[in-house]
Image: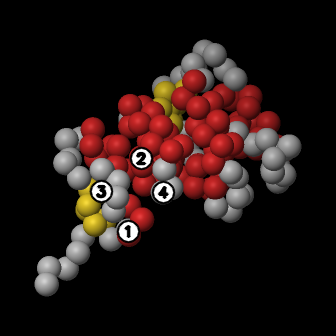
Amino acid sequence: MIGLDTDVPLRWLVDEAVWPDDAPDQTAKAAEALSRRDAQFFVNAVVLAETIWILARPLRQKKLALAALIRRLLDTSNIAIGRRDAAEAALAAWTKGRRGFADHLIGAINRSAGCSTTLTFDQKAEPADAYTRLRRES
């Protein structure tokens, strides 16, 4: 198995119809490498979250397009996703929720690790069942 850093799946997911490809040589090399069916690649949860963050923030991609890209990674036979169960749960919650994908992924990973909740200062996370807002006792 071969681990992938964020820039490789990011280049593999580039769609010039949606955003300009500023490094076509890297895109071609990523596509060539990941098209090898004799190799198995690994995308860990940090790489998955970072890839989606880059696509969402600097590249300003819409949630619907991002969800399709996550699904593409999850459904590619020679790519293994670390914490796949949490990634699937995060994707399902994220498509219905308001917080970022990484927030849902953190909550799902923590739940699958046996955590009853995840403490946060994030006011937007408070209503979610995976999070408890940390407040100062009066």
Sequence-wise, the earlier of marks 1 and 2 is 2
On residue 105, the disc is 2
> Circle 1 sits in a helix, a strand or a loop, which is it?
loop
Which residue is painted at 60% across and 23% down in the image? 76
Which residue is painted at 23% across and 52% down in the image? 117
Q: From the image, tell me which residue sits under label 1.
A: 122
Disc 1 versus disc 3: distance between alpha carbons? 9 Å
Using residue 32 as the reference point, say whether residue 78 is left or right of it.
Answer: left
Q: Nearer the viewer, residue 124 or 70?
A: 124
Which residue is painted at 58% across and 49% down in the image? 52
Which residue is painted at 70% across and 37% down in the image? 12
Q: From the image, tell me which residue sits under label 3.
A: 131
Q: Residues within 10 Å of mark 2 (few under 14, many from 20)?
A: many
Q: Is residue 72 visible?
A: yes
Amino acid at pointer 4: Arg
Identify the coloring.
Answer: secondary structure
Mark 4 near mark 1, Cβ–Cβ under 8 Å? yes
On residue 99, the disc is 4
Eye-nearest disc, 1 or 2: 1
Mark 1 near mark 3, Cβ–Cβ under 8 Å? yes
Q: Residues within 10 Å of mark 1 (few under 14, many from 20)?
A: few
Sequence-wise, the earlier of marks 1 and 3 is 1
Using residue 62 as the reference point, say whether residue 121 is left or right of it.
Answer: left
Q: Where does residue 71 sit, x and y in percent of width and height?
A: 59, 32
